[in-house]
Amino acid sequence: MSTTQVLVLILVVIVLGVAGWFLFRHQRLRRRFGSEYEKVVAEHSGFLGAERELRERERRHGQLRLRELDPAAQQRYAQAWQDVQAQFVSDPAGAVVAGDELVTRLAAERGYPTENFDDQASYLSVEHARTLGHYRDAHEIYLRGQRGEADTEELRQAVVHYRALFAELLGTDPVPTPDHD
């Protein structure tokens, strides 16, 4: 084997190694962020900028001091969620506002920044990508409701969407089913 052939072989191995590394990183981000990955790719007009953004989210998220809730706090939040659902019967728009506020309070107590929705969503996307779409949908309906543009069915959907992220943040189903012994 000539020196040129050896150099070409080494170059091919290096190129394949780098390509494999990029592919592994790409697949890891896709799995971790799910549909949020596609949303960020569309916002950044390509995967390189999107992946840079998602890695930055992971870095910022790593600096948070997240905490688990103690059982008493979980119970308090679960009861508050049941109150939101009960409020829906008489005041659907008010229940959506209360649901939004409750999710925000819960996220803050867990240690997530909650100053504005977009920042909050980016932090939540790192560990809660599976339910983040629900949160985005609920928030959009919330905003339309604030403008008087959401009907009762849409408001009901907002509560259902909020519940998905709420349950994940709470770490338990906020509306436990009764035990049948």
Image: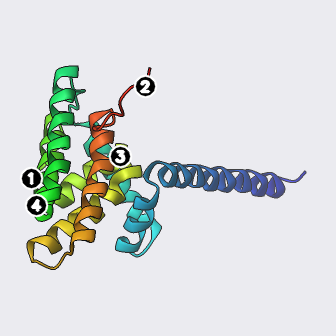
Q: Is any part of residue 140 visible from this angle?
A: no
Mark closer to the chain start, 4 or 1: 4
Give me the C-alpha separation between circle 3 and circle 2.
31 Å
- Above or below for 74 versus 38: above
Residue at the image position 17 percent from the left and 56 percent from the top: 88
Give me the C-alpha separation between circle 3 and circle 1.
18 Å
- Above or below for 115 versus 147: above
Which quarter of the rendered picture does the C terminus lie within? top left
Q: Amino acid at mark 2?
A: His
Give me the C-alpha separation between circle 4 and circle 1.
26 Å
Near-viewer residue (148 or 109)? 148
Q: Quadrant of residue 11?
A: bottom right
Q: Amino acid at mark 4?
A: Asp
Identify the element where label 4 is drawn. Answer: loop
Mark closer to the chain start, 4 or 2: 4
Q: Amino acid at mark 1?
A: Glu
**Residue behind mark 1:** 115
Q: Nearer the viewer, mark 3 or mark 2?
A: 2
Q: Residues within 10 Å of mark 1 (few under 14, many from 20)?
A: few
- Residue 52 place in picture, x, y as percent: 37, 58
Mark number, residue 91:
4
Position of residue 79 in the picture relative to residue 13 (left or right): left
Q: Residues within 10 Å of mark 3 (few under 14, many from 20)?
A: some
**Residue behind mark 3:** 128
Q: Nearer the viewer, mark 4 or mark 1?
A: 4
Mark closer to the chain start, 3 or 2: 3
Residue at the image position 36 percent from the left and 34 percent from the top: 177
- Residue 169 place in picture, x, y as percent: 28, 39
**Residue behind mark 2:** 180
- Residue 51 place in picture, x, y as percent: 42, 59
